[in-house]
Image (tube, rainbow, N blue to C red):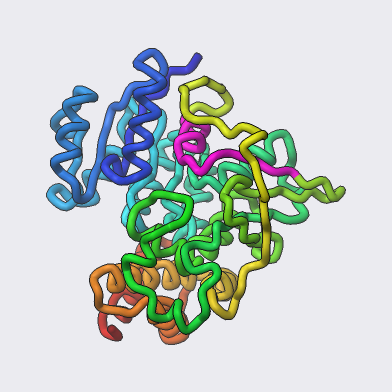
Amino acid sequence: MTRRKIVVLGSTGSIGTQTLDICERLGADRVAVVGLVARRDSALLAEQAVRWGLSGERVVAVEREGSAAMTRLAMLEEADTVVIAVAGAAGLAATLAACAAGKRVCIATKEVLVAAGVLVTQAARDGGAMLLPIDSEHSALFQCLAGYDFSLIDKLHITASGGPFRTWTNERIQNATLEEALNHPTWRMGGKITIDSATLMNKGLEIIEACWLYGVGEEKVEVVVHPQSIIHSFVELRDGALLAQLGLPDMRLPIQIALLHPEKVDTGIPRLKPTQMRDLTFEAPDHVRFPAITLARQAFRAGGTAPAILNAANEAAVGAFLEGKLRFGQILERVADALGSISSSEADTLGKIVSADAAARRFIAENL
């Protein structure tokens, strides 16, 4: 039995709080929380620090202390596991630091691999780090691929709930309200990822993430709409075998798998019963009403800093929608405009990625 010593980057967000719930369930003989980072909710961060007996440099409020403090904590010598749950690309430098330090890096923040997949995977190889996905879809792929060489992959099929607008007309989608966009039918998540689920940009980002995690081209990653959110992904192997991972729409299981793999422990979280499954349905996504997947494929094919531009433009546009500065239908319009207007370069340094990220955010700010 291994006792994990865990740093949680983004401890007050949805994934962070669920990570700490799993740590509670596992108990002190299996886990120790040795560092906490939060960006906004300082009151909850203070409560978490008291609960886990942390103080001083082991507790970082990023807005007050800056990202350098987060990076320092990601490299904490005592820690063997770092959970990347800071929303958006803000956790990139810390992720690279954790990889370079040879940590078990549990990635919930898909934007890190989208913006800097080549740097993150190279840093993990060089540092001897283990990259483990927390995203439910990529956790499902990881579980289905256990024991198989990635060269045997024929297709990866990532499932999508379809979001709240799956059956809406294009005209109605364009003018969706914030309240409507945040009303996800099956998952309860933070604001940014919930809006990405409504536009299906989350699936576009997950395609790119899968390419980096499993070493495949984007043409081998498909999206299938599955409104019930019971099957989280399929792996289709070269011989035609189709493997699937099933579970309730509960992020705590993928979190636990990332923290403990290959160990298996009953923590009492709800389980899916075969007799509970009714009418599982599947359909292809509508790329006319939901063009985000096409945009993501275009960015990945373009290479270089284009995925970083896509990611940053999307983050900024979603932020503007959440603040009432853009209509829902304008989110992807602005992302497409940014991709078409900003020149990409090689994504071989963190500086170039940061520069592309800043250019995309500036473009959105200037085109509200």
Q: Is residue 346 visible?
A: no
Residue for point 42% across, 80% down:
174
Magenta region, residue range: 243-259
Percent from the top left, x then y, of residue 35?
Answer: 27, 32
> Compared with residue 49, is residue 232 higher up or lower down, i.e. above or below?
below
Residue for point 40% across, 28% down:
22
Percent from the top left, x then y, of residue 58?
Answer: 21, 32
Residue lying furthest right: 239
- Residue 210 versus residue 66: which sits nearer the camera? 210
How many discs mark residues in the rendered view? Answer: 0
> Compared with residue 358, is residue 123 higher up or lower down, i.e. above or below?
above
Horizontal side of 344 relative to 230 (left or right) equals: left
Percent from the top left, x then y, of residue 59?
Answer: 19, 35
Horizontal side of 29 relative to 66 (left or right) equals: right
Residue for point 54% across, 43% down:
125
Horizontal side of 281 relative to 102 (left or right) equals: right
Residue for point 16% across, 26% down:
50
> Compared with residue 360, is residue 190 higher up or lower down, i.e. above or below?
above
Q: In which quarter of the image is the C terminus?
A: bottom left
Query: For residue 247: magenta?
Result: yes
Percent from the top left, x then y, of residue 202?
Answer: 48, 61
Q: Is residue 109 visible?
A: yes
Query: For residue 34: magenta?
Result: no
> Compared with residue 14, is residue 204 higher up or lower down, i.e. above or below?
below
